[in-house]
Amino acid sequence: MNTAKTLDPEHKRRRREFFIILLVVPAIIFLTYVESHISILSGNIPVPTNILFLGLININIILLVLLIFLVLRNTVKLFFERKRRVMGSRLMTKLISAFVGLTIVPTFILFFVVIGFINKSIDGWFAIKIEDSLKESLELGRSYYNDLNDRVSSGARGIAVSAAKSRIDEDSDQIMEIINARMLGNDFSSIEVFTPEGRRAGYAISGAVNKNMVPDIEMEHVAKALTGEASSFVDTLSEGDVVRAVSPVMSLSQPPKVVGVVAVSYYVSKSLINRMKDISTAFESYKQLKLLKYPVKVSYFTILLIITLLIVFFAIWIGRYLAKEITGPIQQLAEGTHAVASGNLEYKIKVASNDEIGVLVRSFNRMTEDLKAGKSMLEEANVDLRSSNSELDRRRRFVEIILSNVPSGVISIDRLGRITSLNRVAAELLGAEEGAAIGKNYKEALREEDMELFRDMIRDMNELGVE
């Protein structure tokens, strides 16, 4: 028994493309998620953001090339199938064109609309106003520190000038008066005065801070000031920053000499520092992302194009699948029709579905079974007919033998008046040839003088009901 052959390579190709799509779709979803959270993920991955982003773009481009290959492969294959007039290629072209047309028009409209939104949004991210705001915020933080540095430096120099008019020693009440007066008139966190020997002659700390927030100044800065060099710096502590200024106290005598050191400190809270660091980090990230402005656009455009091509590929794939589901059984039916026309009634088509196509296939199989049964019945009837004809022929010859030996004339006619048989004696009586008279109407074969007698015989037989 012949069966319709399954196109194994075609099924393998479809299965391979299906698995490729199953891999591509989650990859696109994952890459879209990564790119939308790249600023968060880059902090947890020891890779620079720009390298990570460019790597993602390259992966997107690879996926895009893969999808373009699949779409072009299916399109070119359809073109050559139509050119070779493969069975079902025209129907497949119409189905694919319909599916692609229904999907690609709204998809491309949405594609261009989304591209416009993305362009506008990304350009908004890197607008001049945003950049200027970040710069001004960063400059404001720097100006704040510079202002503090100027204030503590100016305060240290002022206290040094006042202290130069007094005697600086460890038990000087005048130095404490100067320190307390300066603490009241300013918002310094602490003021320290040191003797030429490096011993502290006076010290005051603000009530808004404690000793842990503003620890004592390191003696190396005091030693540096004793050489006549003023300095300012920032001590970074766990609780915050301390802006310090150290100024030497110069004597009023000539030539002037260093007779002491003044150190002024200002405490900056941790929360303010963190805000300033956040601004600085945001500005650096902004500058880095600004370099990736066009790669970001390319990445989003690539993802959109991948999604668009994925939709087109699905449309082509579904169109081919539906066309194969329709044209496959039709092709098998066409092959089966040729096989049945050639006399092969054993041809069967495998039923692959329960839809209308499956009903058509089952009807074809049932038809071949009915034809096969009918052919068997015809063959049996033909055998019986041949047997009956042989028997009738035998009997005819037997009757002819008997009639040829009967001394009387015998003529037989059918309902239409045609002579079916006559023996030799009847032919002699009628004056006709025995073989030539058979098949003719009795009116043609008999002589005129015998017609009246023959009519009377037929009339008598009809009256008696003899056939």
Image: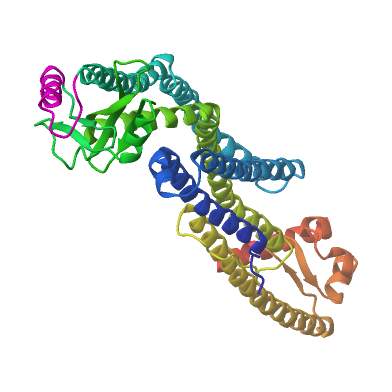
Can residue 364 be seen in this snapshot?
yes
The relative height of residue 90 versus residue 385 in the rendered view (above or below) is above
Considering depth in this image, is 303 or 235 the residue closer to the camera?
235
Considering depth in this image, is 133 or 450 the residue closer to the camera?
133
Q: Does residue 183 appear left or right of residue 383 in this picture?
A: left
Residue at screen point 57% across, 45% down: 59
Q: Percent position (x, y) of residue 263?
A: 26, 29
> Which residues are the magenta region?
166-186
Question: Where on the picture, by quarter, is residue 364?
Answer: bottom right
Q: Percent position (x, y) of residue 204?
A: 13, 31
Name the magenta segment's main secondary structure. helix
Asked whether residue 342 is drawn in magenta, I would say no
Residue at screen point 69% across, 74% down: 382
Residue at screen point 53% across, 46% down: 318
The relative height of residue 293 versus residue 350 in the rendered view (above or below) is above
Q: Percent position (x, y) of residue 21?
A: 53, 51
Considering depth in this image, is 157 or 293 the residue closer to the camera?
157
Q: Does residue 155 appear left or right of residue 255 in this picture?
A: left
